[in-house]
Amino acid sequence: MPLIGTFAAFLVFLIGMVMRNNAVRMAGLAVYVVMALTIVPTYLSGEGAEEKVEHIAGISNDAIEEHEEHAELALWLMVAAAVIGIVTFIAFWKTLRTDLTTGLSILFIVAAVAGFIKVGITAHEGGEIRRPDLGAPPSPESKQ
C-alpha cells in the first residue's frame, strides 16, 4: 500500500509541477502524505508477521532480520518525506515565495524518491523470506 499509493500521488504532484498548477501539486502532496503515513501500521504489523513465520521450515532468520533492518530505514525515510510534503503543502497553501516553494518541491522530490527506492528494496527483501529464489541463496539454517 505505501509504495503504490505514494507513487500515484507523487505522479500527480509531478504533473502539477509540469502544469505549474498549485491545486494539482497540493492534491498530490495531500494524498502522498496520507499514503506515506500508511507505512506506520505496515511497519508495526511486521513483528506479528515475524512471530508467525519464523518457525516455518525453509524460512531464513537472516532474511527476516535483513527485511526488518530495511523496513526501519524505509519507515524513517517515508515519514521524513511526509513531513517535507506537509511543509511543502503549507508553503503552496500560503502562497509563499516561489523560490521557497521550488526549493521545498525539490527537497520533497528527493525525499520521496529515496523513500520509494528503500520501500521497493524492503518489499523485495520481504519477498525473499518466502521465496529465496528471488535473491540470495537460502542460508544453511533455512535448510533445516
Image: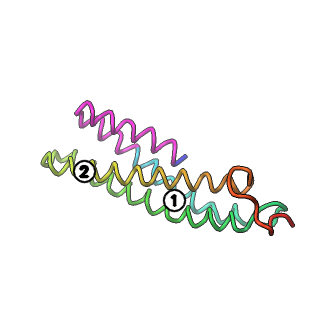
Q: Where is residue 47 in the image (x, y as percent from the top left)?
A: 65, 66
Q: Where is residue 123 in the image (x, y as percent from the top left)?
A: 60, 52
In this view of the protein, which residue sits in the foreground, 75 or 44? 75
Q: Which numbered disc flags the more N-terminal residue, 2 or 1? A: 1
- Specify the farthest residue to the right: 144
Quick one: label 1, few (<14), some, or many (20+) residues within 10 Å?
some
Please provide percent x and percent y for residue 138: 76, 60
* Residue positioned most to the left: 97
Asked if 25 appears above or below 109 in the picture, the reply is above
Badge 2: how crowded within 10 Å, few (<14), some, or many (20+)? some
Q: Residue at x 74, y 51 (%)?
A: 133
Give the residue at x 52% y 53%: 119
**Residue indicated by mark 2:** 90
Q: Is residue 106 left or right of residue 68?
A: left
Q: Closer to the camera, 54 or 121?
A: 121
Quarter placement of the C terminus? bottom right
Q: Is residue 4 magenta?
A: yes
> Identity of the amino acid at label 1?
Val
| Disc 1, SS | helix
Badge 2 marks a residue whose secondary structure is helix
Q: Mark 1 points at which residue?
A: 40
* Quadrant in the picture for residue 43: bottom right
Who's the residue at 45% across and 38% down the image? Answer: 8
**Left or right of residue 37: residue 108:** left
Q: Label 2, label 1: how many angstroms apart (C-alpha)?
A: 23 Å
Q: Of the residues shown, which amino acid type is indicated by label 2?
A: Ile
- Name the foreground residue: 90 vs 125: 125
In the rendered view, does 19 fall on the left or right side of 30?
left
Magenta span of residues: 3-31
Question: Does 83 lie within the magenta span?
Answer: no
**Is the magenta region chiefly helix, strand or loop?**
helix
Residue 81 spot, x, y in % from top left: 38, 55
